[in-house]
Amino acid sequence: MPLPRSIVSSGRALVRAVLAAGAGICSLLIWLFALLLTTVSMSLMEVQDDESRRLLGWIPRFAAGLFAVIFLASLVVGWRRKWGLARMLAWEFVLGSLLLAVGTLLVFARTTGALEYYPNLPFAVAAIQVTAILALLGFARWSQWEPSRFLILSLFMLSPLLSWLSLDEPAVRQPRHLSDVVPAEMRDPAARELALRYTSQEGKASVRRFHWPRFLPGLPPRSISTWEPYVARLLKQRTELEASWAAIAPEREWVADLDTRPVITDLPMQGAQVWQDPKIALPPFDVVINLGCAKALVLATDGKGDEAAALLTGLLSAVRKFDASALTYQRYFTARRELRQVASTVRYVLARVEISSASRAALAAACGDEQPDLTRLRRFFDAQYANLYEVVFDQSTVTDPFGKAFYNVARLVYNPNTTVNELAVFTAASRALAEKGDLVALERAERHFRRGRLKNFGGAILLDYLTFDARQVTQRFWESEDERRALARELRAG
C-alpha cells in the first residue's frame, strides 16, 4: 500500500532540510576556519622570515582579487541566465568562502612549515573543496532552492550546535609570563652581551665571526665500552685535531669567559621572548665542547690525566651553566647532548688514567651532587607554556579592531580560553610525569592531549602543532642526568 502523499512530501522536505543544513554549515565552518588560520598566521608574523612575511601580506590581496573575480563571473552568468541579485550574491559567498579557505590554509601551511610534516595537505584540501562545491551545486539543482534560502535555514536549525561550539570558558585560569618563570639572575645584561658575541643583532654583524675548523671528530658512540675505535681514530688524526684546536682559540677564550659568569644567558632585561630575541650562537659553543672532549681523550691516552681533567672541568662547568638557562627547544637538546658527552668523556678518562685528588675534587664541584636536577626540567616545561601564552594565546596583546573581530568570529572553531586552560592542565600533568621519568604514562597522556575533537577543533590543531614533544624532552633529560649522576657517584667514591 503506497504511503500518503503528505507523508512523502514531508519526508522529502525533511531530507532537503537536513541536506541543506549540512551543505550550509559546511561552507560556514570552512569560512570560519579560514579566519582562524589567518588570525594565527598574523600572530606569528613576528617570527617568520622575509619570504613568509611577503606570503602573509598577500592574504588580503588574494581575498580581494578572488571575490572580485567571482563577483564579475556571477554577474555574467546571472545576466545570461536571468538570476536574481540575491541568488548571485549567495553563490558568491558560498564559492568564495570555499576558495578563500583553501588559499588561506595553504598560505598558513607554507609559512609554518606544516607542508614538511603533511606533504599531502594540498591534495586533501583540494579534494574537500571540489567535493563541497559539487555537493552544493548538485543539491541546489536537485532541490531548486536558492542558496540564500538553505543557508538561512542551516543557521536556524543548527543554532544550538553553533552556540555550543562557540561556548568558551569565562577566563584563563593560569595566565603566566616568562617574567614569572625566569629567575632574575638570568637577566644579567653583561652576561647577555658576552653570550651574543657571535650573534648578529638588528642587521648588524656580530662582534666576532666564527670560522669552522677543518677537522671535527664527530660524536663518540653512546656506550663507553665501544669507544676504543673512536679514540684510535683520534690518535691517527692527532695532527688535524691539534690544528683545529689551535684554530678555535678565540672560541675557547669565549667559552672560558662565559664560564666565569654565574649564568650563561641570552635573555634581555625586560620583555623576554624566547622565540623572537637574538639568541646565543650554538655552533661556536658546540665545536669547543666537541673538540675539547676529543683533546681530553688524547691527553688521557698520553698519560696526562690532570691536564685532561682540568680541560674537562672547564667544559663541564660551562655546559651545566649553559643547560641551566636552556629555554628553547634547540638549545635544550644541544645542552643535554653536550652534558652527556662531557660526562661520558670524564668517566672514560677516569677509567684509564690516574688523576690527583685536587683534580677529582674540581670535577666533582663542576658535576654537582647525585640528586637529579629537577629544577631545570620544571623551568623548561613552565617556560614553554609561558612563551606560548605570551606569543600566541594572550588576547590582551590584540588591540586593533580587525584582530579582535577575527577572534570573535572564529570562536565557532577556536575557543581561546579553553585552549589555554587545556594547555595549562597538560603542562602540569606532563611535568609531573616527567619528574618521575614515567615515559609510558607520558606517551599515553600526550596521545590523549593530541586527540581530535569536534568542539574547539581549531584550538586542538594549534596545540598539536605548537606544543613540544614532552616524551622526547623527558627521555633526553633522564639519559643525560643519569650519566651525570653516575659520574658524581664515581668522583665521590674516589
Image: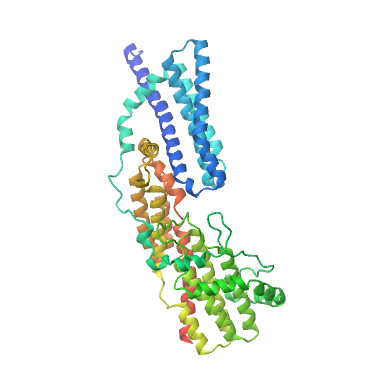
Q: Quadrant of residue 272?
A: bottom left
Which scheme is used to colour this image of the protein? rainbow
Left or right side of 381 for 6: left
Q: Nearer the viewer, residue 244 or 372?
A: 244
* Badge count: 0
Name the residue rendered at 65%, 74% in the picture.
Answer: 245
Quadrant including the N terminus = top left
Q: Position of residue 98 (x, y in %)?
A: 48, 29
Left or right side of 272 for 66: right
Q: Is residue 144 visible?
A: no
Q: Is residue 111 visible?
A: yes
Left or right side of 323 for 116: right
Q: Is residue 366 above or below residue 275?
A: below
Left or right side of 248 for 460: left
Q: Position of residue 137 (x, y in %)?
A: 48, 21
Q: Nearer the viewer, residue 390 or 364?
A: 390
Q: Is residue 119 above or below residue 235?
A: above
Q: Position of residue 297 (x, y in %)?
A: 62, 79
Q: Position of residue 80 (x, y in %)?
A: 52, 11
Q: Is residue 68 above or below residue 50?
A: above
Name the residue rendered at 51%, 34% in the picture.
Answer: 102
Name the residue rendered at 44%, 66% in the picture.
Answer: 189
Q: Nearer the viewer, residue 482 or 364?
A: 364
Q: Is residue 391 above or below residue 325?
A: above
